[in-house]
Amino acid sequence: MSETILSLGVVFIASLCNTVFGFGGGLVSIPLLSLMLGVKKAVLLALTLQVATGMLISKTRHHTDWGMIKRISPALFAGIALGTLILEKANNQFLNYFLALFIYLFIAKSRFFPDIKLGVSSSRRGLYFAGIITGTIGGLTGTAGPVIVMLLSEITKDKVIFRANIIALLFITNLTRLVTAGARGLFDASLIQLSLLCLPLIGLAMVSGQKLHSSVSPRVYENGVQLILLISATLLLAKG
């Protein structure tokens, strides 16, 4: 019972972060849930909250750059397929360290070397590059959010559009993963029951987070995103 209560608390906090910042639900929740549920169930439960909070797309769709989403999606799915293939051969500890290092480098770049660019643009070639990199790392680690943030931050400067694009891309990616997991029978009865218990808390977090987001200034928003990235990277290193 205590594990269930703690799991519900983690899901609520992660859902709130996911709603306010547009990403972070998986990276915040998976390391903590893994301590109580094991990695497999933690990833699947996090996937449930990621898809549920992704329903915010109904609120943000008018701000989404759908032209960009359509151009990046084929490369994104190709990258996910490539990352999944590599995942079969890669060491989990290496993957955690790899993503953590990637995040730390991005934060250092944003804070101390803001004029250095990663070379990502809104051109077809730039979006193809962003999609392949995002999909590959997402397929390798199951956490595409930080990579999407890092790459799209160079394409979209407007806070509202930036968040809307992140929500749309993550919703598409996570929904695909959820359908695949369901089709393969990865959700057992206990996990389905726990997921259903989480839904009201996820809904409350979405309502609260949506109101909180509208009152967050661009500067606070930028700092919040970087803080989520920093915490995520640290948790990944600790998970090892």
Image (cartoon, rainbow, N blue to C red):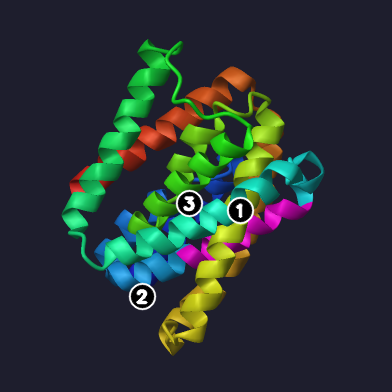
Q: What is the C-alpha distance between the residues marked 2 and 1? A: 41 Å
The structure residue drawn at horizontal position 21% and vertical position 60%, both measured from the top left corner, is 90
- Asked whether the viewer can see residue 6, the reply is no
Q: Nearer the viewer, residue 231 or 164?
A: 164
Pick the residue in front: 151 or 17: 151
User: Any mark on residue 50, and which?
Assistant: none
The residue wearing badge 3 is: 25
The residues bearing labels 1 and 3 have C-alpha atoms spaced at a distance of 21 Å
Task: Look at discs 3 and 2 and give the one toward the viewer.
Answer: 3
Q: Which residues are magenta?
A: 47-58
Q: Is residue 9 magenta?
A: no
- Label 3 vs label 2: CA separation? 23 Å
Mark 3 Cα within 10 Å, few/some/many (few <14, many 20+)? many
Q: Are marks 3 and 2 in contact (CB under 8 Å)?
A: no
Q: Which mark is residue 73?
A: 1
Question: Measuring 77% from the left and 49% from the top, which residue is drawn there?
Answer: 59
The residue tagged 2 is: 1
The local crowd at label 2, few if under 14, some if 14 to 19, many if 20 or more residues have their Cα within 10 Å, is few
State whether residue 135 is above or below residue 214: below
Q: Main secondary structure of the magenta part?
A: helix
Q: Is residue 121 above or below residue 68?
A: above
Number of residues whose C-alpha sits closer than 10 Å to that of mark 1, classed few (under 14), some (14–19) or many (20 or more): many
- Which one is closest to the eye, mark 1 or mark 3? 1
Q: Earlier in the sequence, mark 1 or mark 3?
A: 3
> In the rendered image, is residue 75 in sight?
yes
Question: Left or right: 205 with respect to 96?
Answer: right
Residue 1 in the image, given as x and y percentages of width and height: 36, 75
Q: Secondary structure at mark 1?
A: helix
Of the numbered discs 3 and 2, the one sitting upstream in the chain is 2
Q: Is residue 168 above or below residue 155?
A: below
54 falls in the magenta region:
yes
Q: Secondary structure at mark 2?
A: loop
